[in-house]
Image: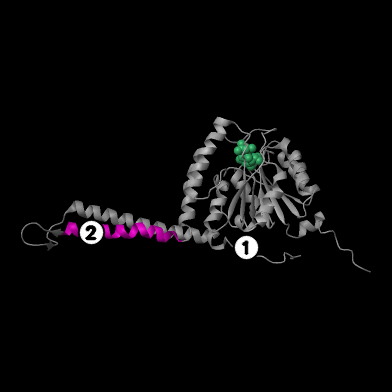
């Protein structure tokens, strides 16, 4: 008798094999948004021919979101839920989702339905055109003009200038990635918005696409104007990571080696005596001011060099820049 093969789109099979797509959604106190979000995601993804999983990360909600998510995961094997023990912030929640997601393509979006799941298929299709990151661009953004849109415009300009990645809207969570981009990232603070810059730093191809944006219907935004300062400091860190990451000690060396020479110059000046008609004489006087300058410069140079070594060590421990930028292409049949 012929064995009946299970339907490849059956939820049980999706559970076992790595799905084509993982959708990672951070949620913090989004009780009223959970059901509409799940329905909208199913409406958007059920018609497309890919297998998918929804990785919903509860970021320490206290309004019943956790229970709703847990129930949803019990009912639908395509839903996987990560419960964080307290509120860690959106970036940490997304990082927790990246840790467990298994899809070959990964999409991130907000859990408050400001992003529209119906944009997901277009973004993922664009990945197939050879891009590693496709960023949503909220061209018609539905947030307050003065406290949200204006600071975001300024921040986006700065970010694009500093990182060299020319996109309009780094803050839009709706983005699609090839999975290698998000696998090895070590994200903290508000850094999820800089994933495109980090990816571009290892040769990833980035593009943007206009997406829909809706005003929040339920619940409240978790952010105020204070976010702009976090974003700016993160920007400096990311700039540093992208520029120096592959060999930090070289860059620190570039500054510290000239300083070594300057310090020796100062010390020598402090130990020489000239201008008394007897030529240049060595070790006859100790000019304490030159020697102090020399020693201070020497200590600075040494510190910089050691700092470079420490950075080198941390880059090796984090592993992102060793392992990122590789994608395995095969038949995808691992079951
Ligand atoms: N979020 C989170 N942890 C937080 C803050 C926000 O998981 O500490 C989630 C939130 O539930 C939403 C997404 O991140 O799904 C975006 O947050 P929000 O809508 O407050 O940001 P805004 O759209 O106002 O920029
Ligand atoms: Mg929102």
Q: Which residue is mark 2?
A: 265
Q: Name the dominant secondary structure of the magenta segment.
A: helix
Marked residue nearer the N-terminal end (1 or 2): 2
Residue 228 drawn at (x, y percent) = 51, 38
> Does 147 appear in magenta?
no
User: Where residue 327 is drawn, which disc sits there?
Assistant: 1
Q: Closer to us: mark 1 or mark 2?
A: 1
54 left or right, relative to 303: right
Q: Nearer the viewer, residue 319 or 225?
A: 225
Q: Nearer the viewer, residue 258 or 122?
A: 122
Task: Using the numbered discs, state the Cα–Cα distance from disc 1 to disc 2 in whole angstroms.
Answer: 51 Å
Ligand 1 quarter of the rendering: top right
Instruction: Give the residue at x 56% y 46%.
Output: 167
Marks 1 and 2 in Cβ contact (< 8 Å): no
Q: Quarter-wise, where is residue 265 in the image? A: bottom left
Q: Return the x and y of residue 276 as percentages of the image width and height.
A: 6, 57
SS for callout 1? loop
Residue 179 lies, in percent from the top left, at 64, 57
Q: Is residue 223 left or right of residue 298?
A: right
Magenta span: 247-271
């Amino acid at each position: 008798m012929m064995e009946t093969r299970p339907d490849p789109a059956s939820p049980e099979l999706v559970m076992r094999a790595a799905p084509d797509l993982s959708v990672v959604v951070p949620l913090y106190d989004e009780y009223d948004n959970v059901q509409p979000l799940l329905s909208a995601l199913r409406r958007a993804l059920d018609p497309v021919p890919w297998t998918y999983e929804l990785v919903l990360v509860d970021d320490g909600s206290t309004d019943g979101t956790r229970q709703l998510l847990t129930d949803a995961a019990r009912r639908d094997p395509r839903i996987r839920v990560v419960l964080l023990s307290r509120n860690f912030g959106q970036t940490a929640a997304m990082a927790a989702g990246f840790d467990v997601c298994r899809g070959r393509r990964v999409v991130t979006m907000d859990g408050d339905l400001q992003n529209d799941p119906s944009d997901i298929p277009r973004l993922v299709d664009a990945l197939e055109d050879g891009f590693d990151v496709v960023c949503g661009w909220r061209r018609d953004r539905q947030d307050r003009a003065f406290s949200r849109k204006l600071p975001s415009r300024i921040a986006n300009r700065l970010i694009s200038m500093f990182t060299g990645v020319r996109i309009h809207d780094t803050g839009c969570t709706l983005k699609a990635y090839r999975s290698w981009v998000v696998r090895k990232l070590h994200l903290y603070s508000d850094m999820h918005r800089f994933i495109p810059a980090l990816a571009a730093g290892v040769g990833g191809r980035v593009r943007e696409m206009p997406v829909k944006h809706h005003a929040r219907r339920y619940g409240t935004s978790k952010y105020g104007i204070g976010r702009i300062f976090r974003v700016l400091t993160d920007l400096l860190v990311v700039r540093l990571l992208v520029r120096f990451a592959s060999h930090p000690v070289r860059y620190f060396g570039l500054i510290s080696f000239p300083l070594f020479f300057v310090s020796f110059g100062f010390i020598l000046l402090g130990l020489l005596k000239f201008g008394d008609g007897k030529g240049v004489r060595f070790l006859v006087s100790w000019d304490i001011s030159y020697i102090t300058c020399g020693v201070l410069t020497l200590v600075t140079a040494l510190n910089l060099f050691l700092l470079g070594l420490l950075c080198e060590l941390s880059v090796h421990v984090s592993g992102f820049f060793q392992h990122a930028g590789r994608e395995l292409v095969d038949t995808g049949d691992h079951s």
